[in-house]
């Protein structure tokens, strides 16, 4: 059974402060977590732990069918970028969903799909020009296909509440790319975890 990804649109769906999730097919989850760790702006050494401490950033990871996923916990906001070793190097397809829910600016939720160090598709999940890509940008073929799915879902629609647009966008991404996350496993079960510690 899969849970899609639309449940991420619920308030504090994973943790207080929002969510940051990286999903990739055909790669073992610890390898994906270590690639994500390499994109931290400040040097950090990943190590396996049992539980997250108050001052750390944790990368919990797991697998579902062909998908591996990494969920960031702790003070992850603003701590990661592409770095010199991007996660999608070597031909990997990588999908990133992020929402700084408690950011006061406010920053809308964001989606990015990268492949082999190329941007394939990115847009904010409120579909407005307030922050970043207000509509899909990237590879023309991918962008056209995603835009058609969004239009079929009645988006953009300025009369809809942002939370509704957020959920609908996540449903579109699930249908188009097949993205899925196991909600109960993420929220209630123990997952392997890497803690990023500063030297």
Image (cartoon, rainbow, N blue to C red):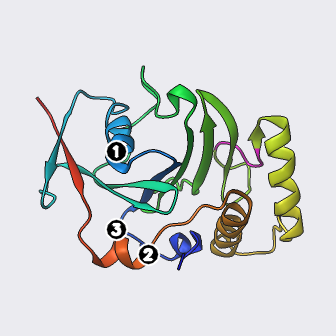
Instruction: Report the residue marked by disc 3.
Output: 16
**Residue occupying the point 39% across, 70% down:** 14
- Which is nearer the N-term, disc 1 or disc 2? 1
Say if mark 2 contacts mark 3, CB within 8 Å: no
**Residue occupying the point 83% across, 71% down:** 153
Badge 3: how crowded within 10 Å, few (<14), some, or many (20+)? Answer: few
Of residues 9 and 59, the one drawn nearer to the viewer in this rendering: 59
Say if mark 3 contacts mark 1, CB within 8 Å: no
**Residue occupying the point 16% across, 48% down:** 48
Q: Secondary structure at mark 3?
A: loop
Left or right position of 184 against 171: left
- Which is nearer the N-term, disc 3 or disc 1? 3
Single out the residue that lies furthest toward the top: 84
Q: Position of residue 108 (x, y in %)?
A: 58, 56
Left or right position of 146 against 103: right
Say if mark 1 contacts mark 2, CB within 8 Å: no
Q: Is residue 17 above or below residue 7?
A: above
Q: Quadrant of residue 184?
A: bottom left
Instruction: Report the residue marked by disc 2.
Output: 183
Instruction: Report the residue marked by disc 1.
Output: 33
**Residue occupying the point 68% across, 70% down:** 171
The reply to whether residue 36 is in sight is yes
- Which is nearer the N-term, disc 2 or disc 3? 3
Residue mark closest to the camera, 3 vs 1:
1
Magenta-tinted stretch: 132-136
Badge 2: how crowded within 10 Å, few (<14), some, or many (20+)? Answer: some
Main secondary structure along the magenta-highlighted residues: loop
Of residues 152 and 157, the one drawn nearer to the viewer in this rendering: 152
């Amino acid at each position: 059974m899969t849970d899609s990804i639309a449940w991420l649109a619920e308030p504090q769906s994973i943790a207080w402060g929002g969510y940051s999730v990286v999903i990739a097919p055909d790669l073992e989850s610890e390898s994906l977590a270590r690639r994500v760790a390499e994109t931290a702006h400040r040097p950090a050494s990943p190590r396996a732990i049992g539980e997250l401490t108050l001052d750390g950033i944790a990368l919990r990871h797991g697998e579902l069918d062909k998908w591996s996923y990494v969920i960031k916990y702790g003070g992850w906001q603003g701590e990661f970028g592409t770095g010199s070793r991007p996660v999608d190097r070597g031909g990997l397809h990588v999908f990133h969903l992020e929402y700084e829910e408690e950011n006061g600016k406010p920053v809308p939720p964001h989606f990015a799909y990268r492949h082999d160090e190329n941007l394939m598709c990115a847009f904010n999940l409120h579909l407005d020009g307030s922050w970043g890509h207000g509509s899909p940008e990237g590879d023309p073929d991918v962008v056209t296909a995603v835009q058609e799915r969004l239009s079929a879902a009645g988006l953009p629609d300025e009369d809809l509440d942002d939370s509704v647009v957020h959920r609908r966008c996540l449903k579109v991404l699930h249908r188009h790319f097949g993205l899925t996350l196991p909600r109960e496993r993420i929220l209630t079960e123990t997952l392997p975890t890497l803690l990023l510690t500063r030297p």
